[in-house]
């Protein structure tokens, strides 16, 4: 199982992380070849979870007491010889220990120091015990059922804040490694869990008010799936099958309904009934139309088992069977084919089937170098004597990590364009190539394509492919999210593209991954949620599986694909070799469920969740104060209960056998601001519950530009979210408001040497110029 390969071979990492975010960053770095030494506190990890078998794999460990001079000296010895440090303490903790960035960089100026606190170091809440639930409540991640005002909020038991912070932190670390190869200089990274939540909520609420004018009238965009499913269009809903199991449809473009009618022999009957001619957007607003179409679909799905429907209609009609996490881990062929699930021995749990790899890379595939090892006390392990992988580290300067990198982005809708948006924020020059005749070319354009140069090009029209080939010859990255069959039909599959640029990084974002029985299945956010158990857990107390209220897989897959691209660029810098990379909605869905993504013979499969979930223990819980909801977040330990009993107004509360009920009664007597202040003063975590709009208008977020109103070049205003992470040497770059699709077509044609062919390309339909002539900047 030992392997010295991987894109990060030769990189040394010290992991001080606890709970989810920090350990997850270090684990994935280890999967990609980094050598990771984990520093564990006396008494073991703060979070006692079976998921530690995942989070601590691939690492060597040592128990060090950082409050003891001997342990601190050992930790400092590791840090001054490392490439990367990962920590997620509250701001100021590492500084007080003498291990802060400004201190250790004096002996290690090339160090990359990644901090993942709950709240940012300059946030007034920086000292709050920012547990996952505290941050999620503050950031609007606990929605009300059906987003109804006055409804009870729901605790989502997936650690979304922690996982998004980890994904962003990973991208930052690799970007910083790329910058260091060019400059020789390290830097500090800070990505707080609270800030990371804005990556999830950027697509919701009034911040996308300016999006409506761009949306095609008949396009159905999965923007605000309601928690009960009663408002979902029938083409994006659940249907019970003959075996009592459920499938979830992902028919958001319109073509699938007619194709399905043809497959089941109902085309003529449904056409006569008029349901095939109704624009899908009308199903969102008209309950009578929703009921009419459901009446045609429901009896059809009851004729066959769910698994048979999935095999029968894909890849022409996008639907997947709603499975449990247990089924995904133990029986799913696709999970094994993509290595999204792997089998590892564990010193405590025995044989485990656990979360595998979230990206695919052809030249430097991720591997687990060793199962989890239980750390020992004493002297820290020494670093491997293996030489660092070859590099071309220089002493130049760059303003951004990806300065000079050209990315060609052919993606549509949400997940795919997110890849290019992220690479742009790290400094890449991103050219968005859109099919001017495509149905989805403008959906989400304003919130995913800001800062990109936009080109309208039809590769199937005469001359279109010639222009695209010339662009590829200059590109470092090609980002796609269409199927392999479509790529071959267009003449831009990987072997063909590599003929134009041998060292290009060719990326494909997909629904299920590049290999396996579902490799050519298509789909949207729903499919990742259905196959991995996400919907079954969230709807465990409902009539049928329930769609998560956020497009976590769309956004998450964008981040993971960007990670794979940057890993490939780093590898190319050191070797000159390009490769194929990708990620998928299903792979991202597994990562978000990391606490539950492990199977072993003693596993209890009754995971917490459901629409009625208010918390996982009395001390991790949403409570209703006299004026609204707030979240109490602290480990359910004897120490926590002693602390609670010392809080004014909670005297004697822990003496009752039903602590949750007793706390609920006490908390109803005062405002949530009062309770949050008293609890945080006592060292516990607490925060008022916020809606998405509350969080978007959070004073700290507004003053720091996380949430900002902008005017678009074609008119209209909307709210955008700025880049979340902070890098001291190569700061992130916020994209400018997106202009209309195709805004830079003429400039790009001239830049590529087609200036004398513009009229003919436009006349033949290969290129389309914007209706409004761009003005010189």
Image (cartoon, rainbow, N blue to C red):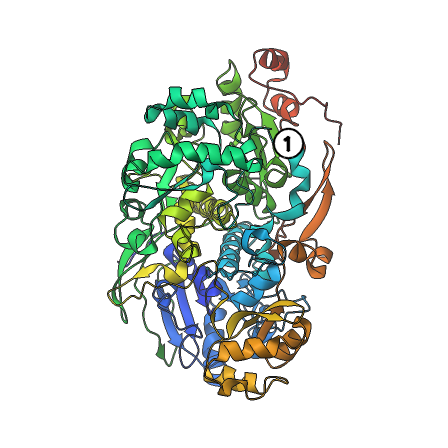
Query: Residue 266, percent across and down?
Result: 36, 24
Query: Residue 427, percent across and down?
Result: 60, 44
Dot 1: within a 10 Å radius of its alpha carbon, few (fewer than 14), some, or many (20 or more) residues?
A: some
Query: Residue 212, percent across and down?
Result: 65, 35
Query: Horizontal placement of 623 versus 27: left or right?
Result: right
Residue nearer the viewer, 349 or 564: 349
Whether residue 102 is visible to the viewer of this picture, yes or no, is no
Whether residue 305 is visible to the viewer of this picture, yes or no, is yes
Quadrant hosting residue 242: top left
Query: Residue 631, percent across and down?
Result: 57, 69
Query: Horizontal placement of 544 versus 761: left or right?
Result: left
Residue under pointer 1: 214
Residue nearer the viewer, 232 or 356: 232
Query: Horizontal placement of 760 versus 328: left or right?
Result: right
Residue nearer the viewer, 645 or 418: 645
Query: Horizontal placement of 55 versus 180: left or right?
Result: left
Q: The N terminus lies in which quarter of the figure?
A: bottom left
Quadrant hosting residue 771: top right
Q: How many marks?
A: 1
Q: Residue at x 72, y 31 (%)?
A: 714
Residue nearer the viewer, 667 or 391: 667
Rendered position, 206 above or below 411: below
Q: Residue at x 57, y 15 (%)?
A: 765
Secondary structure of the residue carrying numbered label 1: helix
Q: The C terminus lies in which quarter of the figure?
A: top right
């Amino acid at each position: 199982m030992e392997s010295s390969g991987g894109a990060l071979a030769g990189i040394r990492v010290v992991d001080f992380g606890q709970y989810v975010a920090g350990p997850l960053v270090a684990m994935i770095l280890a999967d990609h070849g980094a050598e990771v030494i984990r520093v564990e506190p006396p008494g073991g990890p703060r979070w006692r979870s079976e998921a530690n078998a995942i989070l601590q794999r691939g690492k060597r460990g040592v128990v060090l007491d950082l409050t003891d001079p001997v342990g601190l000296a050992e930790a400092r010895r590791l840090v001054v010889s490392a490439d990367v440090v990962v920590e997620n303490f509250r701001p100021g903790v590492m500084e007080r220990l003498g291990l802060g960035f400004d201190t250790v960089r004096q002996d290690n100026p090339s160090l990359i120091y990644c901090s993942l606190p709950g709240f940012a170091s300059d946030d007034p809440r920086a000292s709050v015990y920012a547990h996952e639930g505290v941050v999620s409540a503050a950031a609007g991640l606990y929605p009300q059922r059906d987003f109804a005002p006055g409804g009870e909020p729901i605790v989502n038991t997936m650690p979304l804040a922690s996982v998004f912070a980890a994904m962003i932190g990973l991208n930052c670390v690799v970007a910083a490694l790329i910058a260091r190869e060019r400059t020789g200089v390290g830097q500090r990274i800070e990505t707080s869990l609270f800030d990371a939540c804005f990556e999830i909520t950027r697509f919701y609420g009034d911040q996308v008010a300016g999006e409506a004018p761009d949306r095609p009238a008949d396009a159905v965009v999965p923007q605000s799936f309601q928690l009960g499913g009663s408002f979902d269009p029938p083409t994006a809903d659940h249907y019970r099958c003959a075996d009592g199991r459920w499938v979830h449809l992902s028919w958001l473009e319109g073509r699938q309904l007619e194709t399905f009618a043809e497959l089941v022999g109902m085309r003529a009957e449904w056409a006569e009934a008029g349901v095939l001619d109704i624009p899908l957007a009308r199903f969102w607003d008209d309950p009578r139309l929703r009921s009419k179409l459901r009446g045609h679909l429901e009896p059809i799905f009851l004729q066959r088992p769910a698994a048979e429907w999935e095999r029968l209609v894909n890849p022409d009609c996008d639907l997947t069977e709603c499975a449990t996490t247990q089924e995904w881990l133990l029986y799913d062929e696709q999970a094994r084919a993509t290595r999204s699930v792997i089998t590892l021995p564990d010193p405590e749990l025995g044989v485990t089937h656990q979360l595998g790899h979230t990206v695919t890379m052809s030249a430097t595939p991720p591997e687990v170098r060793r199962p989890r090892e239980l750390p020992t006390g004493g002297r820290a392990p020494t670093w491997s004597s293996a030489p660092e992988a070859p590099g071309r580290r220089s002493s130049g300067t760059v303003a951004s990590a990806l300065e000079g990198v050209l990315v060609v982005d052919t993606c549509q809708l949400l997940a795919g364009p997110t890849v290019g948006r992220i690479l742009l924020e790290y400094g890449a020059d991103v050219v968005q190539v859109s099919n001017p005749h495509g149905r989805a070319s403008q959906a989400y354009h304003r919130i995913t394509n800001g800062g990109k140069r936009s080109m309208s090009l039809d590769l199937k029209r005469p001359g279109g492919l010639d222009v695209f080939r010339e662009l590829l010859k200059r590109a470092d990255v090609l980002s796609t999210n269409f199927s392999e069959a479509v790529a071959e039909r267009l003449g831009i599959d990987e072997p063909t593209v590599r003929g134009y640029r041998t060292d290009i990084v060719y990326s494909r974002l997909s629904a299920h991954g590049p290999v396996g029985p579902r490799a050519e299945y298509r789909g949207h956010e729903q499919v990742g949620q259905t196959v991995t158990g996400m919907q079954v857990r969230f709807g465990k107390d409902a009539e049928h599986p329930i769609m998560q209220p956020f497009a976590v897989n769309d956004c998450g897959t964008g981040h993971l694909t960007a990670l794979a691209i940057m890993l490939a660029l780093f590898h190319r810098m050191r070797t000159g070799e390009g490769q194929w990379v990708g990620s998928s909605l299903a792979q991202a869905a597994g990562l978000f469920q990391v606490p539950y993504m492990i199977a072993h013979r003693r596993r209890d499969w009754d995971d917490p969740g459901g629409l009625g979930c208010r918390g996982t223990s009395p001390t991790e819980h949403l409570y209703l104060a006299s004026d609204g909801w707030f979240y109490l977040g602290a480990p359910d330990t004897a120490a926590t209960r002693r602390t609670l009993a010392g809080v004014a107004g909670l005297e004697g509360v822990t003496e009752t056998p039903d602590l949750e009920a007793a706390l609920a009664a006490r908390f109803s007597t005062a405002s949530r601001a009062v309770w949050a202040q008293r609890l945080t003063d006592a060292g516990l975590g607490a925060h008022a519950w916020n809606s998405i709009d509350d969080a978007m208008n959070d004073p700290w977020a507004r003053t720091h530009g996380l949430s900002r109103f902008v005017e678009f070049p074609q008119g209209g205003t909307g709210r955008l979210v700025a880049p979340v992470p902070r890098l001291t040497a190569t700061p992130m770059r916020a994209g400018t408001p997106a202009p209309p699709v195709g805004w830079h077509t003429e400039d790009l044609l001239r830049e590529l040497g087609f200036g004398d062919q513009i009229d003919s390309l436009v006349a033949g339909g290969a290129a389309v110029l914007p209706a409004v002539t761009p003005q010189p900047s």
